[in-house]
Image (cartoon, rainbow, N blue to C red):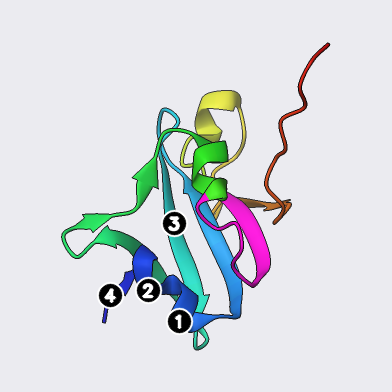
Amino acid sequence: MKILLDHLAAHQPIPRVIIHSLDASIYQVSVEIDGSERPLWETPERLLSRRNLTALRELFAGLAIGALVLRQRSAYDEMVGQPLREGANTLEVPLDTRTYTLVEGP
């Protein structure tokens, strides 16, 4: 069963939202529901993706989220002189679940 963005509110609280940082500022999302990580779909035919991390985070404003993380996997350690790893090279950075507020200037 696909999890659609429009139906995400029915799955609250959501333990974890994972924003996957892909190539060239492309972000896709998966959610943890019922103990498993599942991709989030914008429509039944299209995965949710954006080129702007802030715009993507704003889609989750008002939802009950336990944790919001940015995940990046790198397959390019050897390009920067790192030894090959036996496991996945995954970095997860916690993000604030609050959206940014613009402050008007003088």
- Which residue is pictured at 50% across the width and 52% down the height? 59
Badge 3 crowding class, 10 Å Cα cut-off, few under 14, some 14 to 19, many 20 or more, is many
Mark 1 — residue? 10
Report the disc number at residue 2. 4
- In the image, what residue type sits under mark 1? Ala
Q: Is residue 58 left or right of residue 49?
A: right
- Which residue is pictured at 60% across the width and 57% down the height? 61
Mark toward the viewer: 1 or 4: 1
- Secondary structure of the residue carrying tag 4 is loop
Q: CA distance from mark 2 to mark 4?
A: 10 Å
User: Which corner quadrant of the image does residue 100 belong to?
Assistant: top right
Instruction: Single out the residue that lies furthest toward the bottom.
Output: 34
Point out the image quarter for the C terminus: top right
Mark toward the viewer: 2 or 3: 2
* Residue 41 drawn above or below residue 99: below
- Secondary structure of the residue carrying tag 2 is helix
Q: Residue 52: x, y in percent?
A: 48, 33
- In the image, what residue type sits under mark 2? His
Residue extent of the magenta highlight: 59-71
Between 104 and 4, the residue placed more toward the observer is: 104
Between 89 and 56, the residue placed more toward the observer is: 56
Q: Which sits earlier in the primary sequence, circle 2 or circle 3? A: 2
Mark 3 — residue? 29
Q: Which sits earlier in the primary sequence, circle 2 or circle 4? A: 4
- Secondary structure of the residue carrying tag 1 is helix
Q: Which sits earlier in the primary sequence, circle 3 or circle 1? A: 1
Mark 2 — residue? 7
Between 67 and 98, the residue placed more toward the observer is: 98
Q: Is residue 26 magenta?
A: no
Q: CA distance from mark 1 to mark 4?
A: 13 Å
